Image (cartoon, helix red, strand yellow):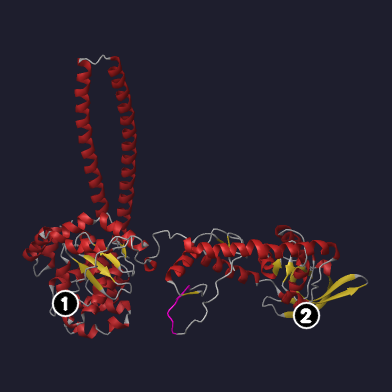
Amino acid sequence: MPLFNRKPFSLLEPPKDLDSKEKVFQIRFTKEIFRDYQEYLKRLNLYRQRVWTCKMSGKSNLTFEEALVSEHNAMEKAQNMPTELMAYVLRMIQYSTLGLHELVNKIYASLLEEVFEGIELHSKKDGSVVPCKILKILYSDGTKMCEVGWLCRDKTLINTSVVKAVDLFYRRSPVSRNTLKLFIRDSTTQTTPWVIHENLAKKYGIPTDPPSDIMHYEGLHKKGRKREENGTIENGRKKLKKDEGHVPIKYPIDDLLVRPDGDDPALFKRPPLATDFRVPRCSVGDLLMVWDFCLSFGRVLNLSPFMLADMENAICHKESNVLVVEIHASMFHMLIKDKGDYFTVLQNKKRKLKVSLVTWAEYLCDFLEMTKNEELLSNIATIRRGYYGHIDTDIKLKILHELVEEATKTSAIREILSERVDQKQALNATRRESTRKDREEQNLNTEIAMKNEESQTDAVQDGNETVDELARGKEEKEKSNVSRSKTEGKRHLVRHHEMEFDKLSIRSSPLGKDRHHNRYWFFRREGRLFVESADSREWGYYSTKEELDALMGSLNVKGIREKALKRLLEKFYNKIRIFATSDSAPSFLRGLMLIFRAPCFTIVTSFFFPRT
């Protein structure tokens, strides 16, 4: 059992007269049962404090559960003690008055000098060192002899012979010092002197009567221990139980443990999620991933920007759609240019290395055969007959998901990722240098201001304020205006750095999670705030400023997850609000897409990203 502040600790007894149908609270790792939720919460918070020590290893500054795991691992290591050495080691432990470190070293050195039946050692035979196993220990004229069985590589006995014990040696110690230390702690009930468990003493025939030289000391020790148990430890336990009702809860804590308090500010009701997707809700994640990838790497893919709604409509369309063809064709061109596995498949089939509006479905079938995904392979016949549009929407998105996964392995994408990482590191270095210069300039301005203030104070005290002082005041005012202008320039530079940093983002990450582990996503090219359920099977979104405000007002900052989520929502609030309340940018892009979307996808891509 873990030690509380390095002292013994006992668990609470279950409540009396407990009904099997009664609803109670139980701590998972101690199995303690509570009727009152507040008592349960206070006890749980006590277990989460880093005041516990592993009794076996002595590790401190742990939570109760971490100490339990540490003790379990230590016990498993203690069981690595070879059974052949058990009796010998326990005899050396019993009633030893040495400290733990000295006792471990003494046993360790003694084991290297002794031999035991059943232990594997090494000895010289025919001029070479050969492993052997001691079968029996013999004595001849006061000399210790050993009957050994010689071992081959698979540990089988070849033949036997009798050798002197002094001719046997260990290539490595039969047991480590750490195992010895854990074994000593696990097998004893007290220290100074060490006393092993009664069951171990009976099992290995070890005397339980203390030696005469420590009999008097042992009697005193027992009385002292009894007094300590009846006094110090019991009083500590009573004090703990008494003070448990006053243990303050340190927020934030796990969100699911937070309960409303009378002093808490009123939280808004969380607005309902909009779920009017055209694709199945379980496939929204694939839709967002493919769309975000196409826009993030549109230049290398030779794809023009398009709205998420356009892609959603195209995927759900039952006929051949230009946007869907463009996305597939751009992915195939990238895979062919990379000359990887897909390129090899096409060469083996003697395909032309040019995808067209007519033949793109054949290249898609070749890709599906390469993936060897049974769910996707079952749709090859439908695609070959020209009925791609009749495939289920979730299957279409899974195919695109596989294409994106394959595209991310290409050298073109990896080069872009590497370049963006370098650019982000350079931008970070620039920001750090700018921050350092600003700090130095601020310190310098502070010193100058303090000196000017002192000089002005001296002038007023001397009564010598003249026209020079008035001119100095005018000069200070001009300096203040210049300083204000510099501050505005710095703010503009900070905003510019933030915008550049966003452009260099490698992948999208959720803003955070709420108390139920639902994830919140915001994409800078899309106005909605998406919400993904904990199991990734359900999706929804918020799209208005009022919904965003209500969501932020419903988050409880006493919970770890919701506090972090609210902090990031506040950071991105202006960006989300601009997208949620303004449709100017999406309308502009949508208009361009409607104007320039043509049957041949090369026209559109050359307009936005000319081929070089």
**Bounds of the magenta segment:** 21-27
Label located before the other in sequence (1 or 2): 2
Q: Are marks 1 and 2 in contact (CB under 8 Å)?
A: no
The part of the image, by quadrant, that contains residue 486 is: top left
Residue 246 place in picture, x, y as percent: 47, 61
Asked whether 4 or 34 is in front, the reply is: 34
Is residue 303 shown to the viewer in this render? Answer: no
Q: In the rendered view of the protein, which quadrant contains the N terminus?
A: bottom right
- At x 86%, y 75%, the residue is 138
Which residue is identified by label 1?
316
* Amino acid on which the number 1 mark rests in the picture: Cys
The part of the image, by quadrant, that contains residue 93 is: bottom right
Does the magenta portion include 62?
no
* Amino acid on which the number 2 mark rests in the picture: Asn
Q: Main secondary structure of the magenta part?
A: loop
Residue 529 place in picture, x, y as percent: 22, 64
For label 2, the crowd category at 10 Å Cα-Cα, with few meaning under 14, some 14 to 19 and many 20 or more, is few
User: On the picture, is 528 further left or further right than 175?
Assistant: left
Asked whether 385 or 40 is in front, the reply is: 40
Q: In the rendered view of the protein, which quadrant contains the C terminus?
A: bottom left
Is residue 27 shown to the viewer in this render? Answer: yes
The part of the image, by quadrant, that contains residue 290 is: bottom left
Does dot 1 land on a helix, a strand or a loop? helix
Query: Which disc number belongs to residue 159?
Result: 2
- At x 17%, y 61%, the residue is 545
484 is higher (above) or lower (below) than 455:
below
Tag count: 2
User: On the picture, is 452 further left or further right than 213?
Assistant: left
Does dot 2 land on a helix, a strand or a loop? strand
Residue 323 place in picture, x, y as percent: 15, 70
Between circles 1 and 2, the one closer to the viewer is 1
Asked whether 511 or 391 is in front, the reply is: 511
